[in-house]
Image (tube, rainbow, N blue to C red):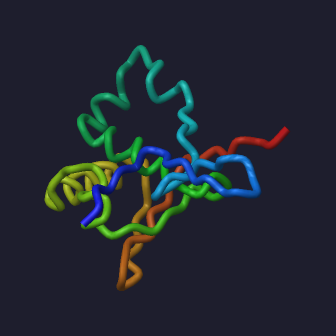
Amino acid sequence: MPYKTNLPRKIISHDAKPKTFSSSRSDWWTPLWRGLTVDPTAKHFRAMGSSVWLYLYLLTFANRTTGNLFRRISTVAGDMGMSSRTISRWLKSLKAGGYIEVRHTGRSLQIAITKWKPINKR
């Protein structure tokens, strides 16, 4: 079985310039608004704790316009190298803090980042 990685791989075509792609997503950056980290009261730090890592994961894979994504807990756990129990606990923490809304679809979770701010295209 070939080694899987999320690092971009080069695709060489004889009739075009080399292209890069990622096995999961071609975007390598995530929008993060300053209010999460610049907060003299540290309310987000206290509310999120270590679940901030899951929140960053959700920001990375959310639809850039809507702030929604569909994922299975096992997929997130595998992507992050964490146990499913940890991911479930972090989801519960983020939901209780009002950072996300979660809806079960039967096959996966529909996760909506509650205070999503789309980046305007200029």
Q: Nearer the viewer, residue 17 or 63?
A: 17
Q: Nearer the viewer, residue 10 or 90?
A: 10
Q: Nearer the viewer, residue 18 or 73?
A: 18
In the rendered image, residue 32, in percent from the top left (x then y), is placed at 53, 34
Question: Left of 54 or right of it: where is 35?
Answer: right
Q: Residue drawn at (37%, 76%), measured in percent from left and top?
A: 108
| Residue that protrudes farthest toward the top in the picture | 40
Placement of 2 over or under 106, stated as above or below: above
Q: Quadrant of the N terminus?
A: bottom left
In the rendered image, residue 47, in percent from the top left (x then y), is placed at 30, 36
Q: Residue drawn at (31%, 65%), measured in percent from left and top?
A: 75
Q: Quadrant of residue 52?
A: top left
Q: Residue drawn at (39%, 67%), measured in percent from left and top?
A: 71
Q: Residue drawn at (76%, 57%), measured in percent from left and top?
A: 15
In the rendered image, residue 85, in percent from the top left (x then y), is placed at 14, 59
Placement of 36 over or under 102, stated as above or below: above
| Residue that protrudes farthest toward the bottom in the picture | 106
